[in-house]
Amino acid sequence: MVSSTPEVYLDSASAERLHPAARETLLAALERGYADPRRLHGPGRDARLIVDNARAVVAECLGVAPDEVGFTSSGTEAVHRGLLGLTAATGRYGIVHSAVEHSSVLHAAQWRDSPAHVSVAVDTLGHVDLAAMAAAAREPGVGAVALQAANQEVGTLQRVDELDLPAGVPLLVDAAAAFGHVPLPRRWDALAASAHKWGGPAGVGVLAVRRGTRWTTPFPGDDGLDQPGFPNVPAALAAAAALQAVVAEQAEVGARLSVLVDRIRSAAAALPDVEVVGDPAHRLPHLVTFSALYVSGDEIVNELARRGFGVASGSACTASTLEPSHVLAAMGALTHGNVRVSLSRDTSGEQVDAFCAALGEVVTEIRSRAGVP
Amino acid sequence: MIEIDCRDLPCPRPVIELAKALPEVPVGGRIAVVARDPAARYDVPAWCRMRGQAYVGEELADDGVPRYVVERLS
C-alpha cells in the first residue's frame, strides 16, 4: 500500500500538528525531565518542577488552581476517569449525556448499566435540548451529567452555561474539541481535554475537577486526579507550552479561520445536493462538516487525498465500523458522502480556495461514475 | 407499490437506486427500499428531506430486512 502525506492537512480536529512553541519545550524537557518526580534527588526534583510548571500553566488557562488539574494519557482517559469518578463518588451510576457526545462519554456510560442513563436528543443544528437534559438530571439514580463544549464532528457549540442542573448532580464538560479554539464554558464541575487537539503532543489528556466536587478514582490506584503510573513529564510540559500559545493567539487565529470556514461552507452549499451540517454561527471557528448526496465517504476522502487534501469523514464506509456517525444520525443529517474539514493556525486562503475547487470536481466526478440521475 | 431490493448494497447505493427508480413512481405513489445497510435508516429520510419527498416510515420485509417507505410528492 502506498502511503503519502497530504500536501494540505485539513484534519486538525483529529490531531493537530505540534505547535512551534511546544517543540523546543519538548526537546528541553526530554533532556531534563526523565526522572521520577516523586524522588527527592536532583533529577527527581527537576522532573517534579517540570510537572508542577505544566500543571500551573494548564490551571491558569482554565482559571482554576493547580491542585484542581490532573494529567492523563489521553482525552478519552480523562473523560472515563472524570465521569466514572463522579458517579463512583455519588454512588449513583446513572449518566445523562447529549446524543452527540464523543464516543468516550458513550463508552463510559455503557461501562456500568443503569436505568437512569439517558441520551438527550439534539436538534438539526446539533444543540442539545437543555430543558430535557435538566429534567433527565432530576430523575433518581443520576450521578453525573456530561455535555460537550463543542461537537467534534460538526463544530456546534453547546450552551453549557445555560444548563440548569439540580444541586448534587455534577457536570462534566468534554472540552476536547473546544479547548484552545474558543473560550470555554464557565459552568462545570469536571472538565476533560486532549493536548493533541490543541497542538500539544499526543498521549496527554487533562482532567480538571473543581475543589468541593465529590470525585474519587474509579480505577485501581491512587486517589489523585493524575492517572496512576509513571507520568510523561516532557509531554505534559510541551502540552502546557502549546496550550499557553494557542490560548494567547486564540482570538486572532479564530477570527481568521472562521472567515476561511465560511468560504468552504458557501462553496459546499453551492454544490447541488450538498448539505452543510451544524450551527452556521455558534460554532468552532476552524471546523466545518458537509454531506454530499449519492457519494460514498471513502471515495470522496480518497479522491481529495489524491488531489493533495487530507480530510476526515463520519460516513460508515470510512470507519472501522459499518455504523455511520452517531452524531450525524442524531441530527437527522445525511450520513454518507460526509467530509469534515478542520483548519490549522497556518492554513492559508489559497489552500482553502484550491480545496473548494477540488471539492466541486470530485463530487461531480464520483456522481457521474455512479450513474446518478 | 414499487419495491427495490438493495439488501446487499453498501451505502450510498440504496439511496442512489431510490433516486434512479423515482421517475417510475407516479406523484402521490409510494416506493419501498429494502436494505440491510445501517446507514439507510438515516439516509433515506435525509434524502426525502433534501429532495422534497415524504418519508413514510420503516417496516420489515418478509425476511425481516428493514424496508423504508417513501411517498413521491413531486
Image (cartoon, rainbow, N blue to C red):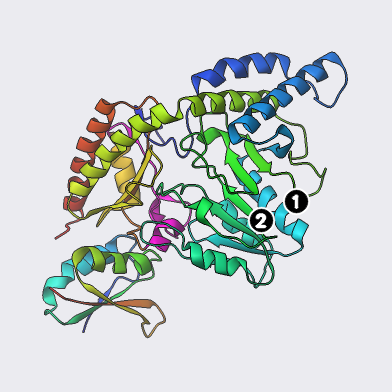
Image side of residue A188 versus residue A316, left or right? right
* Residue ID for mark 2: A170
Q: CA distance from mark 2 to mark 1?
A: 10 Å
Q: Nearer the viewer, mark 2 or mark 1?
A: 2
- Which residues are drawn in magenta? A307-331
Q: Are marks 2 and 1 in contact (CB under 8 Å)?
A: yes
Residue A25 visible here: yes
The reply to whether the magenta stretch includes residue A318 is yes
* Residue ID for mark 1: A215
**Considering depth in this image, is A204 or A172 the residue closer to the camera?**
A172
Q: Position of residue A112 (x, y in %)?
A: 69, 64
Q: Position of residue A271 (x, y in %)?
A: 18, 48
Q: Position of residue B24 (x, y in %)?
A: 12, 75
Q: Residue at x 73, y 25 (%)?
A: A52
Q: How many numbered circles does the render carry?
A: 2
Chain of the residue that carries numbered disc 1 in the rendered image:
A
Question: If you read the primary sequence from the N terminus, does the residue marked by circle 2 or circle 1 appear first?
Answer: 2
Residue A322 visible here: no
